[in-house]
Image (tube, helix red, strand yellow):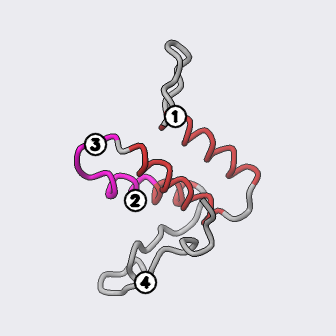
Amino acid sequence: MEIAPEGDGSTPLRDAVADTLARLQNDDDIEQVAVGFHHRIVFIHPFPNGNGRWARLSTDVLLESVGRERFTWGRLSNEPGKSAGAPGWNRLNL
């Protein structure tokens, strides 16, 4: 993780959000963009606890903001009691 020069207003989280918004303008694979966003923000690790929950919530908000359904995060659907992985995990090249 890079430290931003003092005074330029840049932070790893702000950079991740800006980069993701730019990719959403230019990339038609929104699920892959969302998976990459999740990976970046969970790596930032801003809290002592709850970073995974925060990253999943942030990714869900991102997906819903562009009219997509939230990831199931281990369930077959967003209905309780079903199970499967988030789309895109196997295709993502980081």
Residue type at mark 4: give it: Ala
Residue in the image at 43% along x and 52% along y: 58
Q: Residue furthest right?
A: 26
- Residues under labels 2 and 1: Cα distance? 17 Å
Mark 3 residue element:
loop
Please name the residue that numbered disc 4 is placed on.
84
Sort mark 1 into few (<14), some (14-19) or many (20+) by Cα contacts within 10 Å.
few
Residue 79 x %, y % = 36, 81
- Looking at marks 2 and 1 on the same chain, the residue that comes earlier in the sequence is marked by 1
Which SS class for mark 4? loop
Residue bearing the label numbered 1:
14
Secondary structure found at label 1:
helix
**Residue beneath label 3, please?**
47
Tags 2 and 1 touching, CB below 8 Å:
no
Q: Residues within 10 Å of mark 3 (few under 14, many from 20)?
A: few
Q: What's the magenta region? A: 46-58
Question: Which residue is situated farthest in the left direction here?
Answer: 49
Q: Which of the two residues, 51 or 67, is positioned nearer the viewer here?
A: 51
- The residue depicted at 73 percent of the width and 49 percent of the height is 25
Within the magenta stretch, is there residue 44? no
